Image: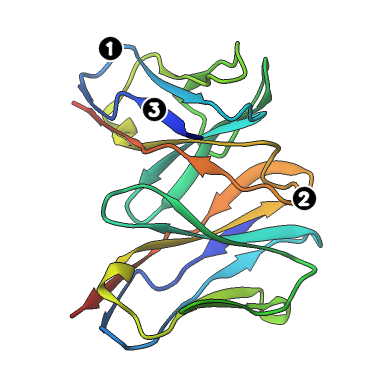
Amino acid sequence: EAQVTQNPRYLITVTGKKLTVTCSQNMNHEYMSWYRQDPGLGLRQIYYSMNVEVTDKGDVPEGYKVSRKEKRNFPLILESPSPNQTSLYFCASSLRPPSGAQETQYFGPGTRLLVL
Amino acid sequence: AQKVTQAQTEISVVEKEDVTLDCVYETRDTTYYLFWYKQPPSGELVFLIRRNSFDEQNEISGRYSWNFQKSTSSFNFTITASQVVDSAVYFCALSIYNFNKFYFGSGTKLNVKP
């Protein structure tokens, strides 16, 4: 089954304790992206990746890191989480960038993060 | 700069009513794509439709229809004869040709009451 998976689905942590949220897709997609969803703000793009070893900032990259060492995986790293990073996070993938002619992004189930 | 505005934060209707969700976008580019996604209470994001900037034809899919008007930079979504299962948050989104970012509106929460 084609899917985007994220782990963990729920996470409670404390300020400053490094964490990683994993994202994996089994569709051989080139484009992957991370978003955060906050009330009243919708989804905002954090980082995206065009392909292996190619990543770029979205609109809200501060406090986050990503890596793309393999095509299927795109982990989101919070080196020193702060309470303002409490949010719902979504990973997404598409065969090509969403600006392509027929591309549609597939979203993971979301990771709810609480930073105390 | 690109921007998507969904001015309706929350809408409540009674089952079988028609409802329209508004979406206004801003971009200076001439080639772009507009999307609608549904987020039911379970939290996942479900793709509904994609429309490119050169195709202003309205689209109908069952009880759903979309009205794209470049003259007013709007891409509105209408649900006819709403049902309780339509209760969700609906997001409008924009991407620009050859530009790899994706922009979402703030979402409209639709409550359909029995």
Q: Which of the labelled discs sits on residue A6, or is there none?
A: 3
What is the quadrant of the N terminus of chain B in the image? bottom right
Q: CA distance from mark 3 to mark 1?
A: 20 Å
Q: Report which residue position mark 1 lands on.
A: A17
- Image quadrant assignment for residue A59: top right
Asked if badge 2 and badge 1 are on a common chain, one would say no
Asked if disc 3 and disc 1 are in contact, CB closer than 8 Å, the reply is no
Left or right of A2, for residue A99? right
Q: Chain of mark 1?
A: A
Q: Report which residue position mark 2 lands on.
A: B97
> Pointer 1: residues within 10 angstroms few (<14), some, or many (20+)?
few
Q: As drawn, which residue projects farthest toward the bottom?
A: B17
Asked if badge 2 and badge 3 are on a common chain, one would say no
Residue at the location (66% across, 45% down)? A98
> Pointer 2: residues within 10 angstroms few (<14), some, or many (20+)?
some
Provide residue A36's location: percent of width, then percent of height.
42, 39
